[in-house]
Image (cartoon, rainbow, N blue to C red):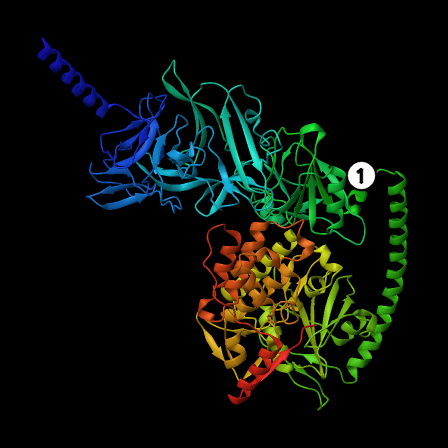
Amino acid sequence: MELCRIILVLLSSIIFLIVSCFAAFDRLHINQPIKDGNTIVSDGEIYELGFFSPGKSKNRYLGIWYKKISPRTVVWVANRQTPISDASGVFELTTEGILQIYIGGNNVIWSSNVTSVFARNMNPVAQLLDSGNLVVWDERSNNENPIWQSFDYPGDTLLPGMKFGKDLITGRERYFTSWKSPNDPSAGLYYFRVDTNGYPQIFLGEGQAETLRLGLWNGVGFQGIPEETMNPIFSTEFVVNQKEIYYRYKLKSTTIQRLILAWDGMARRLQWIKRTQEWVEYANVVVDACSRYGPCGPFGRCSMKSSLPCSCLEGFEPKVPEEWNAGDWSSGCQRKKPLDCRTPDVFHKISGVIFPDTRRSWYNESMSLGECEMVCRRNCSCTAYANLDIRNGGSGCLIWFDELMDIRECDDHQQLYIRIATSELAAKGQLSFNKKNGVLLVLMLSISSAALFLSAVAYACRKKMKKLHKKERGSGGHTLDKDHRTHTPDKDHTTVQMENLDELSFFSLHKIVEATNNFNIDNKIGEGGFGPVYKGVLENGRVIAVKRLSETSQQGLEEFQNEVICIAKLQHRNLVKLLGFCIHGNERILIYEYMDNKSLDSFLFDETKGLLLDWPQRFHIIHGIARGILYLHQDSRLQIIHRDLKAGNILLDSEMNPKISDFGLARKFIGQDAMAKTKKVVGTYGYISPEYAVHGRFSIKSDVFSFGVLVLEIVSGKKNREFSHEAHNDNLLGHAWRLYKEGKSIELISASLRNSCVVSEVLRSIHVGLLCVQHHAKDRPTMLSVVLMLVSEGALPPPKQPAFFTEECYSEVDNVSSLEDYTITLLHGR
């Protein structure tokens, strides 16, 4: 009997061990690998982890799926990009706390890539939680801080409790990508991500393009999605603070629910119905003609309730009427009457719309609506403002800069205030005659009457001047033949060959004299290397900038012809527009569109005016300059190296859009790697690249260097060549490099930007600036790379030491150049 009892005990122990080996546990310990065919299950038996084959595929992947739902519904895949062709896969946890999948004994095909500082004295364990999260803990830490978790690396599924957004401390971004197909879990064409530029918002994209944008978070839910706020099943939150930005939802009951970005690009919220054993769509993102991103272009409004979906906002009209009438609304709308920051503009209130794209916006969570209006009114670049949060009657401030994109009609009653010219509402009889507006209307009528009187006087004067001009032409004026060749009978006058300038107008000297009041000193608005620049007004009322070559100019006929020929063939929103030219005897004159806000240096380096340039405007200016240079280098009819990029040659229009000017030193080239050499080095202290200053070699990378200097000047508000610091003798580039190496780049920012800056944008801009000013041209990025780096959020390559230039360095450059028989013409900025 005793023997029988011993045998029974042994059999029971063996059976227990056998059952234990095959039992489902929720943890994975060191030296306890999971082979294909084995699984672990969460404690509540909700989720299961193991190897599987999706759909009709025979490839094997490690994934997590619902334990009790059939057919198998996968919510996470580890080795999405590296499938296993057979059942040889093994999943294990290493002593360093790293999860890995290997085949063939030691061939690792996937790893959690944990850079662990806990490797010593650590007792790691992996656990599958009932939330669907696979976590790696140190058992001694009481599960407080996971070493790694699958929730940080989502696939195509958002589970309750999972954060979707960006960790601003670590830089980790959690975004979703669709499967390539039902049989292939590798990353497909579509993505769902939180964009943190400006006020954060959620985009659905395909490839490199955004195809759909969710309405803004208003403190309760997303605009246009009522089920986010009015449902008994789940609650949502959208958190925006200094540490992180994320969206998350939580279930209010034991319902099983998931949000999936399907392989066909559809975002669906699905709920498991136990009674019918099926997934049912609880809600999905509605897709119609208005839901795709920006169908009506800038300042357009999309509505599915109208026969034609697109219309222009109040105070705006189609930018290209022919395209608009043909059903192509992509060019959008433009203002009927331009804004004039010298007189108060008004704000037109609209509601029932999803607010515009906020990537060019600024926000403050503590401001009132009245304070928000004041901030917007003081900034000429501000095009609209609104409350940020609808709770408690509305709070917070959100303001937009530049064009308003992707405005869609919805049932939301949140109000948006759009800036339009006062004259536009007055023309429609929409100004109420209160005391304030009454004074304004009387003033406008008075100005109009005076303008009519002055116009009559000016017309009489012009008729008299034309008669005098005809006499002048008959006694020795100039004529212009079909080849744009100017001839004068005076033997001392210069004959100039100007070719292929059909795009430009020829202006008579008489017309320019009339427009500038005979180059009156009161009309002088600037002075450059070319000569003085005057403000002028043509007969039709158009305001122009007149650039007159002076007798003492460091630039001459060659630069004049070069600027005319180059810029006549260039058309881009970030290049100043040349309207025409004039050659009369020794007079050489260029006529440009007038820029209301003069040059960038007049703002950057002025303590008072610098306060008007907040960070969103500066970031916008950096982007605009980059796009303009990219156009010159790559996309224009003539590939151009500018050679004199500096703050003084960046002009600002009435809406603070940057425009590159002064092409007198520009040169054409062919090919991205083209490099030329000259014995006449021209440029401006602080902006020219070392290879150009010392050896006369210039290329597109010379412009990249100048752009890098510009970026650091825009961020800091300091001039490179005049920068000084009590702790060292480096110029601005050297100072920026010191701060970067010490991890203190944010200290470079101008003090006036502290309250408006977006830290991630500032740090990225400084980093890009340092990449552009690296000593060797080959190390600098192209402008295409620069533009992409500025708008993306990916990791940037580390910069190398920049070329340091101080005033002392330039004297050394002069000595080297003279030995090599080079002439250096370094132009001082205005």
Q: Would you say 486 lies left or right of 2 here?
A: right
What is the quadrant of residue 439 in the picture? top right
| Whole-percent x, y for residue 90 in the image | 24, 38
What is the quadrant of residue 299 in the picture? top right
Question: Relative to 51, is 754 above or below?
Answer: below
Outermost residue, bottom direction? 491
Q: Would you say 187 lies left or right of 774 here?
A: left
Mark 1 packing: few (<14 Cα in 10 Å), some, or many (20+)? few
Give the amino acid type for the residue marked by disc 1 in the picture.
Answer: Gln
| Whole-percent x, y for residue 485 in the image | 63, 80
Please indicate, yes or no, whether residue 497 appears anywhere in the rendered image: no
Question: Relative to 399, is 488 above or below?
Answer: below
Q: Which residue is mark 1?
A: 430
| Whole-percent x, y for residue 325 in the image | 60, 44
Between 352 and 714, the one nearer to me in the picture: 714
Residue in the picture at 84% in, 77% down: 468
In which quadrant is the N terminus drawn? Answer: top left
Question: Relative to 777, is 626 above or below?
Answer: above
Q: Would you say 473 lies left or right of 116 here?
A: right
Residue in the picture at 57% in, 41% down: 200
In which quadrant is the C terminus drawn? Answer: bottom right
Please indicate, yes or no, whether residue 697 appears anywhere in the rendered image: yes
**Element marked by disc 1:** loop
